[in-house]
């Protein structure tokens, strides 16, 4: 399965099913969990800084850009390798995937649909998830690269209106598919622009902003924050992590982190 960014390739299928990833298909926030996984010593300060940006009313798209500046100077090859290790570790937990959404995507695939994952996360996190669920295509954040390393900048946040743009581009590549026959699954108000592109949209979780949308069949409520924290860095994960080789630690604070720390 190839990863296409923002509707650059045809997906195939009798109809398309667009699904958000974080807390819709999997029970955690992949971007933060992956950052924790690479064992950066400044993780807590960065997480606090990003939360502070959100609390200050900074648009999610700009918070998304701030996050990716943390990866400036990192090797793409190494980050992708770590993404594979992260997925192998996390997906070993029984609660990694949300079973309701997982079952819905499997049902659609059996009916001949093309599954498209739509996420503000980036390929090291999303690609292995897409392979597992048999997604035909991935619409996620594309980081700019120079000489094999991330620059810290991105082409377009795939959040909110960015999801609308990505989904519309994908639909235009499939003139034989009626958008009214397509589906979307999401858990957050920022998924509404994606919902607006298709005929059948379903809410996963309990965000009151999505109360007017039907609940996804078998959908779980939003994971309990304490359970999410347990998954992200609690004892269950660390027990499994004891068996893996140490991940290289970046001791030097990369560009952009100081600004996030000051945002607190």
Image (cartoon, rainbow, N blue to C red):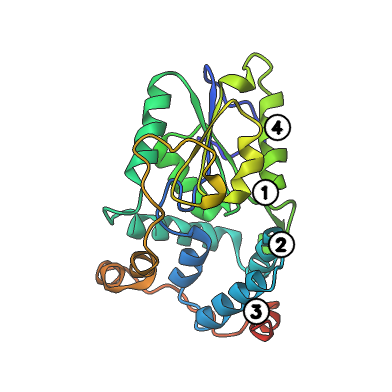
Give the quadrant of residue 28: bottom left
Count of numbered labels shown in the rendering: 4
Q: Quadrant of the C terminus?
A: bottom right
x%, y% of residue 263? 68, 81
Q: Position of residue 66 (x, y in %)?
A: 69, 68
> Mark 2–mark 4 contact, CB under 8 Å?
no
| Residue 59 in the image, given as x and y percentages of width and height | 71, 62
Q: Which residue is mark 4?
A: 168
> Dot 2: what SS?
loop
Q: Residue at x 39, y 39 (%)?
A: 101
First of labels 3, 4 by sequence position: 4
**Circles 1 and 3: CB distance less than 8 Å?**
no
Q: CA distance from mark 3 to mark 4?
A: 35 Å
Residue name at image x 62 percent, y 78 percent: 49
Tell me the mark number nearer the camera, choosing from 3 and 4: 4
Q: Which residue is mark 3?
A: 254
| Horizontal arrangement in the rendering, residue 19 relative to residue 154 (left or right) | left
Real-space Cα separation, disc 1 to disc 3, in angstroms:
28 Å
Frontmost of labels 2 and 3 is: 2
Task: Tell me which label, 1 or 4, sits earlier in the chain.
Answer: 1
Q: Are marks 2 and 1 in contact (CB under 8 Å)?
A: yes
Classify residue 167 as left or right of residue 207.
right
89 to 190, vertically: above or below: below
| Residue at mark 1 | 160
Q: How far is disc 2 from disc 4 in space, using C-alphas?
A: 22 Å
Q: Residues within 10 Å of mark 4 (few under 14, many from 20)?
A: some
Specify whether residue 50 is in view: yes
**Mark sitting earlier along the chain (1/3):** 1
Closest to the observer, 170 or 243: 170
Q: Nearer the viewer, residue 155 or 204?
A: 204
Q: Which mark is residue 59?
A: 2
Outermost top residue? 176
């Amino acid at each position: 399965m190839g990863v296409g960014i923002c509707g650059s390739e045809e997906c195939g299928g009798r109809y398309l099913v667009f699904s958000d990833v974080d807390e819709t298909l999997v029970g955690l926030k992949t971007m933060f969990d992956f950052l924790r996984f690479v064992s950066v010593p400044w993780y807590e300060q960065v997480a606090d800084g990003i939360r502070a940006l959100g609390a200050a009313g900074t648009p999610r798209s700009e918070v998304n850009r701030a996050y990716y500046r943390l990866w400036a100077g990192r090797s793409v090859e190494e980050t992708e390798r770590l993404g594979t290790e992260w997925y192998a570790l996390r997906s070993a937990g029984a609660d990694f995937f949300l079973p309701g959404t997982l079952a819905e995507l499997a049902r659609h695939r059996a009916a001949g649909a093309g599954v498209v994952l739509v996420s503000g996360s980036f390929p090291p996190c999303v690609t292995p998830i897409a392979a597992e669920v048999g997604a035909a295509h991935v619409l996620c954040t594309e980081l700019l690269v120079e000489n094999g390393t991330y620059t810290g900048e991105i082409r377009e946040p795939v959040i909110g209106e960015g999801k609308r743009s990505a989904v519309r581009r994908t639909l235009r590549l499939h003139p034989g598919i009626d958008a009214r026959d397509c589906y979307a699954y999401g858990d957050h108000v920022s998924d509404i622009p994606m919902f607006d592109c298709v005929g059948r949209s379903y809410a996963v979780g309990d965000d009151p902003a999505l109360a007017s949308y039907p609940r996804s069949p078998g959908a779980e409520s939003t994971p309990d924050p304490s359970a999410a924290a347990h998954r992200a860095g609690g004892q269950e994960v660390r027990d499994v992590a004891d068996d893996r080789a140490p991940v290289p630690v970046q001791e030097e604070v990369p560009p952009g982190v100081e600004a996030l720390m000051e945002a607190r």
